[in-house]
């Protein structure tokens, strides 16, 4: 098996995609949102990071984080967030899904094991990734416009005047 190499950039800014196990649509459930919010807060107490952009969809999330100047360990942060979310939700362990590999890695049936990461290279790349994060609910037909989706940092950007309230308008085919 090949070993995936993650980017190591202390103080870097990174784009992430994290997906639920078997793409089950549980992330926008009120209990799940609360557990995820609590898990992130707990993680940031010991391993701080800035959330530059965020969107939560039913079966995946996208985030852009900036880490402290001397730190490049986003993997431990994601592991802690996923684990804490699973514990807080008392992750219903579906025995038929707890294959030996999941048991070996002490995983629940809430999250896919891995996540996607992209190192932000420059300001243009950052803006492109922020736009992608905010447009994602429209792309997946969860909303007709970016402003209609409640679980996104788009609203924070719009309140600061960094994005128009009608960013992107209505989804185009």
Image: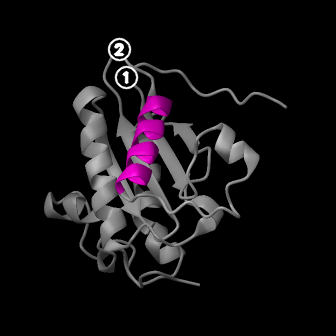
Which color scheme did the rendering employ for the protein?
one colour
Is residue 127 visible in the rendered image? The answer is no
Q: How many marks?
A: 2
| For residue 122, side relative to residue 7 (left or right) | left
Q: CA distance from mark 1 to mark 2?
A: 6 Å
Instruction: Using the rendered view, name the quadrant where residue 36 is placed.
Output: bottom left
Tell me, yes or no, whether the highlighted magenta stretch contains residue 154: no
Please give the residue where the numbered disc 1 appears in the rendered image.
11
- Residue at image position (63%, 38%) is 105
Please give the residue where the numbered disc 2 appears in the rendered image.
70
Image quarter in which the N terminus is found: top right
| For residue 2, side relative to residue 5 (left or right) | right
Point out the stretch of residues depicted in magenta.
74-88
- Residue at image position (30%, 33%) is 49
Q: Are marks 1 and 2 in contact (CB under 8 Å)?
A: yes
Q: Position of residue 66 (x, y in %)?
A: 35, 34
| For residue 145, side relative to residue 116 (left or right) | left
Image height check: is 170 above or below 94?
below
Image height check: is 11 above or below 155?
above
Image height check: is 77 above or below 23?
above
- Binning the other alpha carbons within 10 Å of mark 2 as few (below 14), some (14 to 19) or many (20 upward) gives few
């Amino acid at each position: 098996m090949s070993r995936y190499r993650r980017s190591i950039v202390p103080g870097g800014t990174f784009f992430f995609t994290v997906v639920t196990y078997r793409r089950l649509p549980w992330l926008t459930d009120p209990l799940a949102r609360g557990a995820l919010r609590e898990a992130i807060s707990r993680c940031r107490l010991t391993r701080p990071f800035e959330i530059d952009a965020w969107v939560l969809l039913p079966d995946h999330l996208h985030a852009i984080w900036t880490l402290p100047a001397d730190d490049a360990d986003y993997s431990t942060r994601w592991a802690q967030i996923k684990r804490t979310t699973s514990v807080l939700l008392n992750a219903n362990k579906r025995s038929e899904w707890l294959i030996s590999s999941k048991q070996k890695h002490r995983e629940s049936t809430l999250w896919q094991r891995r996540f996607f990461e992209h190192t932000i290279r420059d300001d243009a790349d950052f803006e492109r990734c922020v736009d992608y994060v905010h447009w994602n609910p429209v792309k997946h037909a969860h909303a007709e416009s970016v402003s209609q989706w409640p679980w996104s940092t788009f609203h924070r950007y719009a309140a600061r005047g960094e994005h128009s309230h009608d960013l992107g308008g209505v989804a185009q085919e």
